[in-house]
Image (cartoon, rainbow, N blue to C red):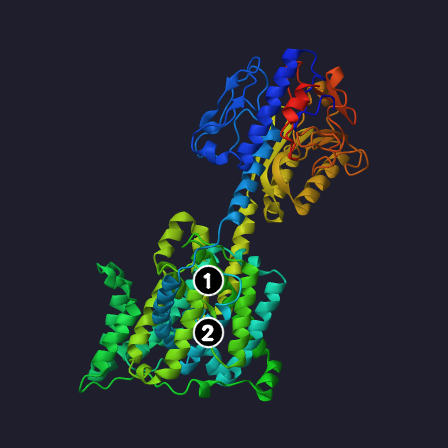
Amino acid sequence: MSGTHARGRYPAHGKPSSRAERAERAAQAAQAVQAEQFLYGTQGTQAAQGQGVQGQGVQGQGTQGQGAQGFPQGFTQGPGHPAHGPEPGASEPPPNTGPLMSGFLKGGSARSSKAGKSSKSAPKSDLATEITASLVVFLVALPLCIGVAVASGVSAELGIISGVIGGLVVGAARGSTLQVSGPAAGLAALVAETVLEFGVAMLGVIVLFSGILQIALGLLRMGRFFQAISLAVVQGMLAGIGLPLMFSQVYPMSDAKAPGTPIENVAGLPGLIADTATNPQALIAAGLGIVTIVLSFLWKKVPGPVKKVPAALVAVGIGIAVASLPGVNIKTLQVGNLLASVDVPGAEQFAGLADPGIITAILTFTVIASAESLFTAAAVDRMHSGPRTRYNPELIAQGAGNTVAGFLGALPITAVVARSSANVQAGAKTKLSRVLHGVWLLAFALLLPQVLALIPISVLAGVLVHSGWKLFAPEEFPKMWRQDRGEFGVMTLTTVVIFATALLEGVLFGLAAGIVLAAVRMSQTVIKQHIEEDTAKVVMAGNATFLRLPQVIEALEAAAEAGKPRIRLDLTGVTHLDHACRNQVEEFTAQQRGLGLRVELLMPGPAKSLSSKGAEDRENPDRDVYAGKDVYAGKDPYAAGNSYSGGDPFQDHNGYPGQDPFADPWANQGTGRATGHGMDRPMPGPTAEWFYLDTRPMPDDYADQYASR
């Protein structure tokens, strides 16, 4: 390319021949400096404040110009073109920038934003705020840990142990900053089924190996993989977790025992209501549960600072007060020695790994716990403006927590929305709050176990009914129906299958339904047929896949049965043509040509002007057009030198077939034409000016050096 290297610009007209031209080039070089300083932030603050960065314009002989919002005027335009500064808050480059400058501006903005993000100072830690937040999280976590343990069919101590591990182990690890982990209500039903089938002793082995698998997935950088799941499946999974949880906890709310599966729990509701109505103590317990649910829904509307106290803690206080009244005999927690509850798996438990049911449970726990933790991470990241979650380290942290929990025979751990949102709302900025909440849990359970024995079970059941309702989120179903009825079907199917069978089966059904829906929608093909004089025409557009093969075959057969001597197949509007449809079209073309018909086949590819081929088009109707180039009948479209339907391998970014992307497109600019593999293209006129922005650092005196050349 000819032209002088002027700090990232290459004028297309050689060295300056006069003082005026040298002055103009110097002005352009000075503008390049200011443009780069503006883009990289050297004077960006000043410009953003509207003070303006002076820029030497190129309109005329170096007249002064100032762009909008302090943008150097005219630094991307040729002589005589008006300058365009960016609109306030705009992220796109000025409208008259060329492709190179436009790409740089976008890239420059991205780099600037990344630099700003990386250079952003770490959140300021206020020790008092962190301690206060940790106490709030502790008050939310305590009833949840106990309630989840009871709902899971294990002792309350195991729930507290898992909460302590979630704070001390997962809380101190890398990954997320404000997300808080512990035993999750979403896994309560799954844990209860597992304990019922394999016993509490096997729970430790299952959780232990689930944690090891999570660590392996994190090391393999599979954390982001869990984001590639349909939102409908996720919402259906959460609803499928919440619905059985609600029905299972209705029974403890009345001091009764749940029958078993979700369907059995629903079927037993009439009998539960009848028994509760005839038992005064059961009525008291149920009343406490109902009060807890009402408080959980309405507590946020209470005016004043009192609403900052967790609703669950208020309900626990009311429950303790009622349970201590004379004549009240409702069930309360029975809390034993925390250390005595630790049950390290032995050889007998590890021998159970030979059972396929245990392996299935491990895989189920791994997938569900990982998905719930990372989905929660995405939700928590939207609650604050601090550091974002790093998914792979967070998955490793969750695995470490579950490994320790499994070794101690405790409940599985996941990130929990209730604890995390309380942590964010309390003003936490660092990991300290979530670590301290684990310290408070440990201290409370070791030093004050007699206080836990005062808490009514019905209150904890009410807390979990509210959690189940939040997971079920019934308002999401009509919302999904309005947005996308296909996704609504996937969401509903996932929920129903989980409720009727189990969590893993429901998720797998939902994923399969989502994939089928996506495949069907990706295969939308429009096929039109019509007759024009002696030609039967078939025009296709969209995505032609094997799912649409019956319609393709029907259209081709109709064209053959039209009885016309010429068939024109226009597939240039097809954005994706899979092997099955391509093979069918090519076989049909060969068959019809063998019968003596003239078949013109236009395959998908970038368009190219064929005006110079007009006579050839009329004289050679039996030709295929691949990627805008002719391949005459009898030639292999995939042979060397011929274009193929997937696109010309030498096609450049401007859509000119035959252009080698590695060749210099301006090698013959003196002739007014650019050549590449024999394909000519017009060059700009003599008044055009080309700019190329070089990102290398430039000396401060470069403008003066350039002007003196």
Q: Quadrant of the N terminus?
A: top right
Q: Is residue 411 left or right of residue 612?
A: left
- Give whichever of 283, 429 is nearer the camera: 429
Report which quarter residue 677 is drawn in.
top right
Mark 1 and mark 2: span between their CA atoms?
Answer: 16 Å
- In the rendered image of this protein, does residue 467 appear above or below residue 201? above
The percent coordinates of residue 50 (x first, y second) are 43, 30
Task: Check disc 2 and report the residue beneath it.
Answer: 190
In the orientation shown, which residue stands out farthest toward the left?
326
Element marked by disc 2:
helix
Q: Which mark is residue 128?
A: none
Farthest residue to the right: give it.
640
- The residue pinned by badge 1 equals 494
One can see residue 69 in this view: yes
Amino acid at pointer 2: Leu
The answer to whether marks 1 and 2 mark residues whose Cβ atoms lie closer than 8 Å is: no
Q: With respect to residue 514, does 161 lie above or below?
A: below
Q: Is residue 283 visible?
A: no
Dot 1 or dot 2, earlier in sequence: 2
- Of tags 1 and 2, the one toward the viewer is 2
Measured from the top left, where is residue 5 in percent x and y? 70, 25
In percent of width and height, residue 295 lies at 25, 67
